[in-house]
Amino acid sequence: MKKINTTVLAAAVALTTFLAAGCATEREHHASPEMMKKATIAVKRDFQEKGIAKMDRVATDKLQDICNRSGDNPSPEMAAMLESEQTTTLKLPADGNYMGDWKAGEKLAQSGQGLTWNAKAGAPNGGNCYNCHQISPEELSYGTIGPSLLGFGKTRGYTSETQKYAYAKIYNSKAFTACSAMPRFGHVGALDEKQIKDLVALLVDPKSPVNK
Amino acid sequence: MKYRIAIMAALAVTWTGSVLAQAKDPTIAGIEKYREMLGDDNPAELYEARGEILWKKAAGPKNVSLEKCDLGLGPGVVKGAYAKTPRYFGDAGRVMDIESRINWCRETIQGFSTADIVKKPFGSADKPSEIEDLLAYVVTASKGMKISPPNSHPKELEAFALGEALFHLRAGPYDFSCGTCHAVDGMRIRLQELPNLTKTADAKGAYTGWPAYRVSTSRLHSMQWRINDCFRQQRFPEPKYMSESVNALITFLAVMGEGAEYKGPALKR
């Protein structure tokens, strides 16, 4: 019985992953790689630091460069390579515990604070999650750039695998989808370990409104 | 001030009366109501009126008016000029949006220094900047015309291509580009609808939506400001005012919005 459950669960997880990927929206992009190169030069000339937003922010990294040049549509081989490179940078919690406090996670998901040039240096960043995702059923003001996360733990199973996936996805979305629209919150240091754990709890804790 | 109170009152009424479950942004309903109250009036008209006086008044180190300014249709022609920008200006050797061009005239005709002009380009509710007044006057003189940037000079084509590339350039701590928020149909950030600026249907409305008088800030904002503020949301450093990059993005948006009828400064949330 246990065995069958696990198989069904694995199939369900695979299916949801497939569906989520299938829904990933194609963005219109017609600029040529040469023009994208010119754009990277133009921003270095035409921008200036302001507040906490310094000029290093317009120096693109390798992943951004490849996504930019390919119109967010790298070849499957290139995408796989980028995803495995991003995976090697994942820093999972040393204590092997992925879950924090879902209430703190809800607050973080609500907050769009942080990293803009008018944000206070050193103030904790929000998660911006509701800007792009439906999460708790009570919150009706949600964006639609990302898929709905309603019932996330319930559909995927309250397992350590689900917790680990949620942690890793929030830490570095590009480890799973090379040119995802979702930020790499942990990778760039926008969210710390405790904050990501709280967000995982919001998505996977059976007590969280997400799973009611 | 009278305007401000009227808007706030209109919004307050709709806000309290609004149902949260309603998908439509309650503030949009508020603005519709406010429009009904005022007929076709818009506080931007105050800017326009001040702008016309400024345009015709001798000012600057050279103490002359802007009446000889060439906005692209010849010296002194204001009517319809905005609808045909951004464009390449041979005397300046570059593509300029309407705001850059008005500032060019303030520099070359009136003798203001570049430093003066770029110092504080965006005004505040109690201290509007002169460029925003002038801008309101100039754009309103294209009311009823179709947006038709020339998009034919090699420099204009280059500006469009650079603007399109900048639109898709992902960078910064969140890997955002304009396209993250504006290149798919029917997306929202919270309840805010996001135009797909790579499609003409949405781009027309977005391009003609600026400059706009914003109820939430009680002031008129230019397209230069709109781009500046979206880069802030994008977590980039600040684009320099009137820089080639900003003008290229405005060129991209104008060409995408080509054919839209210009109705004068908009009224927004």
Image (cartoon, coloured by chain):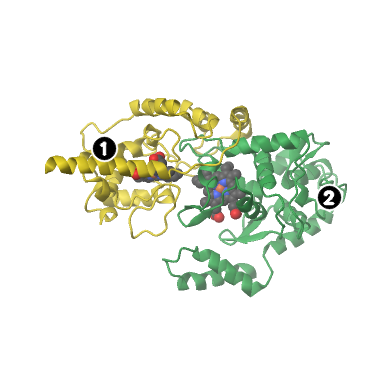
Chain colours: A yellow, B green
Q: Which element type, helix, strand or loop, lies under badge 1?
A: helix
Location of residue B25 in the rendering, given as x and y in whole percent from the top left corner = 50, 63
Can you tell which quarter of the image residue B115 is in? Answer: top right
Q: Amino acid at mark 1?
A: Lys
Write the residue at 50% across / 31% down.
Answer: A67
Write the residue at 65% across / 35% down.
Answer: B162
> Residue A38 vs residue A206: left or right?
right
The answer to whether residue B77 is above or below residue B118 is: below
> Residue B167 vs residue A4: left or right?
right
Q: Which element type, helix, strand or loop, lies under badge 2?
A: loop
Label drawn at residue A164: 1
**Looking at the figure, which quarter contains the N terminus of chain A?**
top left
> Residue A164 vs residue B82: left or right?
left
Location of residue B107 in the rendering, given as x and y in whole percent from the top left corner = 79, 41
**Does residue A98 appear anywhere in the picture?**
no
**Neighbourhood count class around disc 2 (C-alpha, 10 Å): few under 14, some 14–19, many 20 upward:** many
Location of residue B128 in the rendering, given as x and y in whole percent from the top left corner = 67, 55
Can you tell which quarter of the image residue A125 is in? Answer: top left
